[in-house]
Structure formats: C-alpha cells, structure tokens
Image (cartoon, helix red, strand yellow):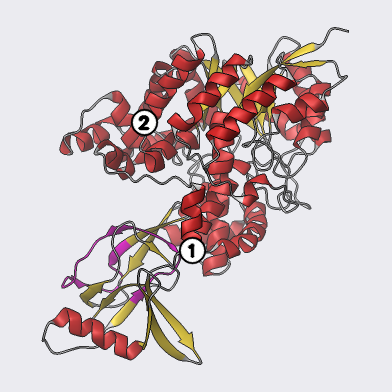
Amino acid sequence: MKKKYIDIMDTTFRDGFQSVFGGRVLMKDFLPALDTAKEIGLNHFEFGGGARFQSLFFYLRENAFEMMDTFRKKVGPDTNLQVLARGINTVMLDTGSREMIDLFTKMFAKHSTTTVRNFDALNDVNNLEYSSKCIKKYGMKNEIVITIMDLPPGCKGAHTPEFYEKTLREILDRGIEFDSLAFKDASGTSSPQKIYETIKMARKILGEDEHIRLHTHETAGVSVACYLAALEAGVDGIDLAAAPVSGGTSQPDIITMLHATKRKPFDLGGLDMEKVLKYEEVLKDCLKDYFIPPEATQVSPMIPFSPMPGGALTANTQMMRDNNILHKYPDVIKAMREVVEKGGFGTSVTPVSQFYWQQAFNNVMFGPWKKIAPGYGRMILGYFGKTPVKPNSSIIELASKQLNLPVTKENPLDIADKNETKSIAYWKKKLEDENIETTEENIFICAACGDKGISFLKGESPLMIRKKEDEEKKEMSKTNGIYTVTVDGEKFVVEVAEGGEVEVKPQADAKKEIVKKESKGKVATETTEINSVVPGTVWKILVNPGDKVKAGDKIMILESMKMEIDIPAPQDGVIAHIAVKVNDTVQEGQVLASME
C-alpha cells in the first residue's frame, strides 16, 4: 500500500530551544547538529521569529538576522526555512504600525525566510489581513494560522470545531491569499477528537489540494494522540523536534512519532529512525552544558485547566527561578484559570499567553485583581483587536479605571499608526542620536527591542545563558542584598554580603546608620525605606541621593516577568540612599532606597 507523504517541520532550533531554554542557545553551539539534521534528510526547519528574535538581542549578544543568514548557508538554497510571526505584533509583544509590519516582512525576506507562519492569538481575522499582504508582497509563503486550545472545564463560547470553521470561512471571505493553513495549539490542550473533527472540517472546505498542518506541544500529555488523529483526518504536515528539546513542554520527538506510525499508511518525511538517532546524539552533545529545567521534561495535569504554552512555561519558570520565587509557580498556574475564563478566550499563545501569565502573577503577588497587568488590561479593552467572546464586564471596568483607558473598537493598526514611537522616523532619530548606523535592520531591531536593542547595538547587552555549571554555582552561593524581616512584630534589617556574611540589625539602628553614612556629619533625620514590591531586576534608576521628590514620583523601574514595575516615592522628601544598581536582581521586600 502506498503511504501518504507527510511533511515534517523540525522545530528543534526555534520552538524546541524556546520551550526548553527560553530561546537562550548560542549559534556556535547548535551548528554541528544542524549539519547532521540536513545530512539525514530534513528539509524543513523552523529557524527564527517568535521569541527567538528578541531573545538573541536580549540575552545572547547575537544578531538574529546574522543567525538566520548563517542558518541558510548551512542548509542550502532549497530548504524551507520558516519563521513564526504574530500577525500585527510581528515578533514584538505589542502591535506594530503598518510601516513597521512592512519593514518586518521586508527584512525577514531579505534574511533567508521561505515561509512565515502568520497567526493572531485572538483569531481576529482583521489582524491577519495586512500582514498577509506584506508577506506575499516580498515573495514569501504565507502560512495562515488558526490558533487553537481547549477551554478550562465548564467554559464555552469559543474553541470548538464550529468556532474554527467560522474563522476559516472569514479568512476565505476576506480573500486573504495563503499558501498553507496551520492549526497551532501552543498549550497542547486540544483533545484528539476535536483535532480530528477540525482537520476534517478544514479538508472538506479547502479540498484535497490545500496543504494543512497541525502544530502542538506535549505539555498536557496528548500530543501524539492528537497527531495520530490529525493524520487520520487528512493532515499534510506536522511539527516535531529532536531530543533533548522534544517532549515535555516542546513538540513530540521525531523518533516517537516514527514509532507511533509504524504499520500506518504514512511516510513521515522519508526519515529513518537510526539516522534520526544519530542526529539526536549529536544534538545532545552540542547542548550537554546547558541547564535543562526539570519542568521542561514534564507533562502537567494542570495544563488543561490553565492552558500555559510550552514555549512560555519554561521562560516564565526560569525567570521565577532566577528571582528565587519558583515556589510561587503552582499558585500562579492555578490562578491562570480564572484569568483565562474572564479574559475573553483569546488563545493562550504569545502575546496573549504572556498577558494571562502576567495577570495571574499579579493576582498571586498583589492579591486577586488588585493590579491589572498592562497587556492583559489593554487586551480586554480592545487594543489588540476583538476577543472571541466579551471579557468579564467587571474586569473590563477595573482595567479601564486602573489603566485610565476607555474601551475601544478602533482598528489596532490605526491606533499604532498614530503612535510616534512605532514609526520608522522615530527609531531612525534614536539611532542618529546614539551615533549608530541607520540601516533598516538596525531600525527594526530597535523598534522590536526598544532600549535593549540600542544596548545591543552599542555592545552593552548582557550575556545571560543558563549553563549547568552556572546554575550549580547559584545554588551554592548566597544572595547578597539588604532585606527587611519581621520577627514577633519587630522589624530587622538583614544585610547579606558576598561570601555569605550576614549582619542583622534592628530597623531603627539600620536607618540611623544609613543616614549617618549619607549625611557625613550633618544632623541625622528620620528616614523611610522604599522596598521592592516584587522580585525582579533593576532596569532604571531615575533619581540620585540628594534629589527632591514628591509622593508618587517614580524613583526607579524594575523589570519582573517581562513587566515594568514602577517604584514610587511614598512621600515628599529627599532621596538619602540608593541601595541597588542597574541590573541588580532584587527580592520581594528588599530595600531599594531610603528617603528623608
């Protein structure tokens, strides 16, 4: 019996790296494995876009465009190299202007891209129309996407085969030109039966000649069953990864699927299990020094209740691990269920998944709905497009009040076009002010990465790779800093110095000492501590000792879980002491500054 050929896209070097390492893998470390992947017959790779654009600039001191060009040289001109793009968000977390979306597609076409997988987390077809035109304008293939997941138990109103049929028919009615259709399940929560019915529906509407793909993750433990259901329903392509970045939070392993389809009428890309085994051995050797977080290899029974994407899960848990609050993860993932239920059922995929996570994080750290995360709030107010169902009315009201924004039905692209900071001219001027070459690549890097893009181009970005050796050192070392603790109602200041030396003083004594140090002989006055409300990293310090401030003035900005957290002055006064510096990691309750 003749077997149906199934196109395999190897996601190892994009989604695999993102799902296990938060995208933080150096190019020089993975290139030997890429050579082997090509040798064994793989001809379709996901090689960039998504979070593997910003992460190179943020953490690796690498230029994503240069990585993409090197990748192309390695695999040759005929290999299908695919990137992931978020519709009107491109590779950013915020909406791009029309000219920035056009620049995105121009640059990605220039730098080796064959196919753009083009999705919108809200399944708002309006958000796919302009980006699709740009993709085709620059000669790339447009893989249009319907994003999918299962809703938490008891929820209804979206994410059924009927909902996906409505979305597909709207794509067709709009006349959007596409070369293939993908159903993307970033959380891996869709049930196999729903997958079967959805692929059957799409095949019936599109006919036998249209290429249909399925992308899923193993996070909820049903990915192989979903792929088998999709194959039976008539899918043409699936996405797989190679160990050690397969399974768990990533895609199913190539060898696993080859085994699962034995004696079935499907030819998975003409791949041979023994050759794939060789590829995986080379890849394991390439990545042997990298720290693999335990949660990256696990299947979680909580995911169907709180659909956290594999590609975001480990990035977030690693940030929590870095900030010594990983113990909060079960609470945050549990809190995410309510956030999804009240948020309008946007698909849990970037950027919406990050909005869900940030709001769940805030609900745990500050109390339920005490602090609306900016992204989540703007989403439910309509600034990213139309959610599948109307979000909870009371949460909409709360978000509007806290963010001081009205509900909107305006096209997000029109809003972005009116924002000066989303224009090419704005970022060109920024580059000129920094004496940096104003190439189109540099303009897009800065538009996508903001100040961190400027830092990269100036050679000032940090190198933040998680290697096993580094993680072991972190476990052994003590965290240095200044903390306030309460024992039996009395407050003490604990100062932990490098090497683990600890000094404990009553808070009143510590305050006097700080004032004494800063006053240099002047009469001491009462000081007030300004503490960190959450763990995070010091991003900006906006004041200096001696500066006069008013209550509510921002004195510094922390970065926590990809959010900017403003630290305001609690009262009128003068800054007496700054206890931290930029890029310091701080803990909840840690003293950041004092004022008098």
* 391 or 287, nearer to the observer: 287
* 421 or 581, nearer to the observer: 581
Instruction: Inspect this view and state whether residue 175 appears.
Output: no
Quarter where residue 333 is shown: bottom right
The answer to whether residue 376 is above or below residue 175 is below
Q: Where residue 63 is drawn, which disc sits there? A: 2
| Proximity of marks 1 and 2: CB atoms separated by less than 8 Å | no
Q: Where residue 476 is drawn, which disc sits there? A: 1
What secondary structure is found at the residue carrying circle 1? helix
Residue 99 on image: x %, y %: 36, 26
What secondary structure is found at the residue carrying circle 2? loop
Query: Does the magenta portion include 538?
Result: yes
Residue 358 on image: x %, y %: 53, 55
Residue 591 on image: x %, y %: 35, 74
Q: CA distance from mark 1 to mark 2?
A: 33 Å
What stretch of residues is rendered in magenta?
Answer: 530-556
The answer to whether residue 297 is above or below residue 245 is below
